[in-house]
Image: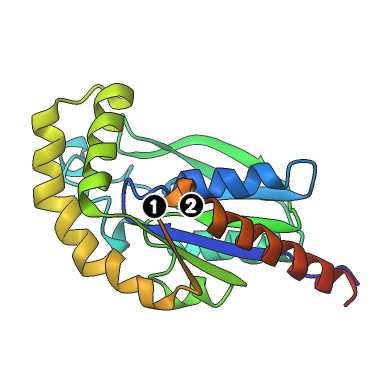
Amino acid sequence: MRAKPVVIGVAGGSGSGKTSVTKAIYDRFQGHSILGLEQDSYYRDQSHLPFEERLLTNYDHPLAFDNDLLIDHIEKLINYIPIEKPVYDYSLHTRSNEVIRVAPKDVIILEGILVLEDERLRDLMDIKLFVDTDADLRIIRRILRDIQERGRSIDSVIDQYINVVRPMHNQFIEPTKRYADVIIPEGGQNYVAIDLMVTKIQTILEQKSFL
């Protein structure tokens, strides 16, 4: 009987370095059976709402995510059943008609700001990580990203951070740190922590191969 895939959750605030940690782990297992799943792909479908209402979406709140679909998809992948991952259209603030077919793998990395917030998601994870980075560094990274990659003004980024991102982080994201098995300071630059995670994943995979 084939062993259950290893599911790793990588949480942390916006700009904390979650993606860097995920990529660093992914790169170490290149050539192996591994896939990354982004919680951002599972924002709720808002096609039933007028565009003006969609503009008011708080993407840092737990209710912005369709966790029921995400959980269903992870359960399918755990049972080696392919899924059709949704694609979110940020220009329209709703889910697009496009989907991406994802084949099951032996290692699943689930990355997102609130992947540790839902107990049902946590129960599916073998390893829970929280990337913990100082707020000043996180906002600098967010400003640079949103200006360079999303064409936003510095005023709009700072306004959103003060009024939405920071309070949502304090209320919903930071408290999930207590659920983490491992807290990784400074994200992808913490090579010692990443090495430890790679070793742990390898050990779990080896154990599962003998089940």
Q: Residue at x 41, y 72 (%)?
A: 118
38 or 65: nearer the eye? 38
Query: In this view of the protein, can residue 66 be seen by the observer?
Result: no
- Mark 2, other Cα within 10 Å: few <14 / some 14–19 / many ≥20: few
Instruction: Decide if residue 63 is on the left or right side of residue 87.
Output: left
CB contact under 8 Å: marks 2 and 1: yes
Residue 152's place in the image compared with 74, above or below, is: above
Query: In this view of the protein, can residue 91 be seen by the observer?
Result: yes
The x, y position of residue 21, in whole percent, is 51, 49
Query: Mark 2 sits on what residue?
Result: 190
Disc 1 element: loop
The x, y position of residue 8, in whole percent, is 59, 63
The x, y position of residue 7, in whole percent, is 63, 64
| Mark number, residue 201 | none
Residue 125's place in the image compared with 148, above or below, is: below
Instruction: Decide if residue 11 is on the left or right side of residue 200.
Output: left
Instruction: Decide if residue 169 is on the left or right side of residue 95.
Output: left
195 or 64: nearer the eye? 195
Amino acid type at image mark 2? Asn
Amino acid type at image mark 1? Glu
Q: Residue at x 68, y 67 (%)?
A: 200
Query: Mark 1 sits on what residue?
Result: 186
Residue at the front extreme? 192
> Which quarter of the rendering shows the N terminus?
bottom right
Q: Give the quadrant of residue 5.
A: bottom right
89 or 16: nearer the eye? 16
The x, y position of residue 90, in whole percent, is 33, 34
Q: Residue at x 67, y 58 (%)?
A: 198
> Which quarter of the rendering shows the C terminus?
bottom right
